[in-house]
Image (cartoon, coloured by chain):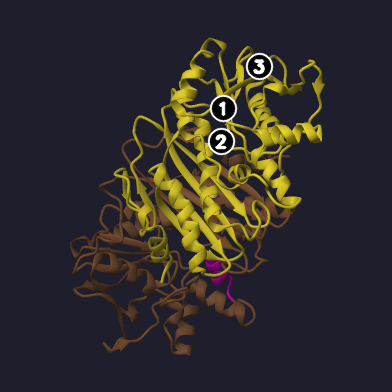
Chain colours: A brown, B yellow
Amino acid sequence: VNEFDLIQRYFSQLTDNRVDTVAGIGDDCALLRPDVNRLLAVSTDTLVSGRHFPADTDPKSLGFKCLAVNLSDLAAMGAEPAWVSLSLTLPEQDEAWLTSFAAGFGELARHYQLQLVGGDLTRGPLSITVTIHGQVQADRVMRRNGASVGDLVCVSGNLGDAALALHEMRHGEVADIMLQQALDRPQPMVGLGIELATYASSCIDISDGLVADLGHICDASQCQAQIQLELLPCSEPVLQHIAQSGSWAVAVSGGDDYQLCFTIPPQHRDKLAKISESSGIAIAVIGEIKAGQGVFCFDRDHQLVKLKASGYKHF
Amino acid sequence: VNEFDLIQRYFSQLTDNRVDTVAGIGDDCALLRPDVNRLLAVSTDTLVSGRHFPADTDPKSLGFKCLAVNLSDLAAMGAEPAWVSLSLTLPEQDEAWLTSFAAGFGELARHYQLQLVGGDLTRGPLSITVTIHGQVQADRVMRRNGASVGDLVCVSGNLGDAALALHEMRHGEVADIMLQQALDRPQPMVGLGIELATYASSCIDISDGLVADLGHICDASQCQAQIQLELLPCSEPVLQHIAQSGSWAVAVSGGDDYQLCFTIPPQHRDKLAKISESSGIAIAVIGEIKAGQGVFCFDRDHQLVKLKASGYKHF
């Protein structure tokens, strides 16, 4: 059994489902025919066991999440998903593990009509590298460097659910299934990203935490963001945790949210309700872009709140 | 220091060198503008420490080789290199190691005007995943499935040097620097692949060994290959080893050659000398495609020689 056979066996529904794929798995390279009217958007992420996830993580969740975090990068640029490569390093060939992993990966891949066009199955310490390809019109792509003074700062969905789940896991069990779902099965904001692309001036997905990721927009756009903490969209459990702990950390620096943080010129404010309705995703205006640099958070008394900006750093 | 800064620091010469890159490292995705008249060829390979290379491998050789093996996949399809992503998982941030790795990787990347457009630096057991993108005209691409009865079977360069080096390493030291170079710094046949693309009916790069890889061509093309062992191109040390051991294994199933094995219709035989001259790469005709299946090797007395086909299998 060679690795192509293994990939075909576990991922068979994902290897032959796009007309713009000239050759998929099974030759030295995949051959793709990108849309001549769009740019190709490419992103790579590696997840390492014991670092990005516990070694005993449910493989179905892992398959789902390793693809979700890459789709989230496409979403942040307003790109439509197309092709994906999967490099899987496993300690041993475990049929049940692979079947379960493929089920989680496949669920999301099929939903977005992604084709698996490259792969590598290697023996070694558990680690997953996904490279994703999407397509986006050059005049609609959202970059990090487009924010301007006066733009509104917005986020999709809720912040802090995944970080609170992780916090609760470390202190026992996660009480709320919704929190566990947010951690295990983040929903990439692909459809929202495509709709936002017409109006947003900049965008990023929140993987390291709101303050850290919004900071990347500010750095790239050479501007400052001012955030009103009471405007942050949070679930009831997260609001309770913030009230009890007296800290906003879970919502602003916890990370793993995979929501979109974007800026939009104030004249497009009235588009937000329509975009929210058509995408089915809540959008909250949480602050404004100012001249300067950095991200500043204010409480309801307009007092500056000092917060650690940094998300997880590998080195 | 975030990972983009690290990548910029070590790979700075590789991140801003192509006009068809709209956005490189530093946003959620890279944005590429593929040539509208060509197909995009994509390949991924993972190298794991202790499995694909010893943990103490010289990082400069490792940087060179992890890119060379991916370039070799592009070469096998006749594609021209364009963009590359590098996911590097390292036990610790080791400045000297990274500098040396980047030197080996960069040497080859610059030679082929590759741009590094994506990256991930993660802490964990040493492992490297490279995803490479090249471009090739649809009517010139070499696939595995194009061989026909009567085609000549050819290989570039010499076979067995890397396998003999590995064999000698396991039994002491590698006496010949040429063998060590073949193992540590395989030269991808990119230029040759592009030139062959006009004439060859099928092609593959030899990573698992001639018989295993030619077997993939036979499977995909539904044909048989018959090889004359005395026609195999081998260096003096490999010929000596074959004579002493009485086995052709090092040349036909050792693997790690990264030479091209291709088939060419007999009417194009006269093109081989010219292609060899212009690319500077020796080409040997080693056999012929017949009806049937599988790869059969014959000695100078026309006797069938039984050989293990399989190269290295991970599972």
Residue placed at 63% from the left, 22% from the top?
B221
Q: Which residue is mark 2?
A: A28
Say above or below: B57 vs A261.
Answer: above
Identify the magenta region.
A176-183
Tell me, yes or no, whether dots 1 and 2 are on the same chain. Answer: no
Which secondary structure lies at badge 1?
strand
The crowding category of the residue bearing disc 2, from other C-alpha atoms within 10 Å (few below 14, some 14 to 19, many at least 20), is many
Q: Amino acid at mark 3?
A: Glu
Q: Distance of mark 3 from mark 2, alpha carbons?
A: 22 Å
Main secondary structure of the magenta stretch: helix
Of residues B175 and B7, the one nearer the viewer is B175
The crowding category of the residue bearing disc 3, from other C-alpha atoms within 10 Å (few below 14, some 14 to 19, many at least 20), is many
Callout 3: residue from which chain?
B
Discs 3/2, front? 3
Of residues A19 and B1, the one nearer the viewer is B1
- Checking the image for residue B288, the label placed there is 3
Say above or below: A104 vs A251.
Answer: above
Q: Amino acid at mark 1?
A: Cys
Which secondary structure lies at badge 2?
loop
Of residues B211 and A244, the one nearer the viewer is B211
Is residue A180 part of the magenta span, yes or no? yes
- Checking the image for residue B203, the label placed there is 1
Residue contact at pointers 1 and 2, CB within 8 angstroms: yes
| Residue B113 makes an appearance in the image | yes
Residue placed at 54% from the left, 35% from the top?
A24
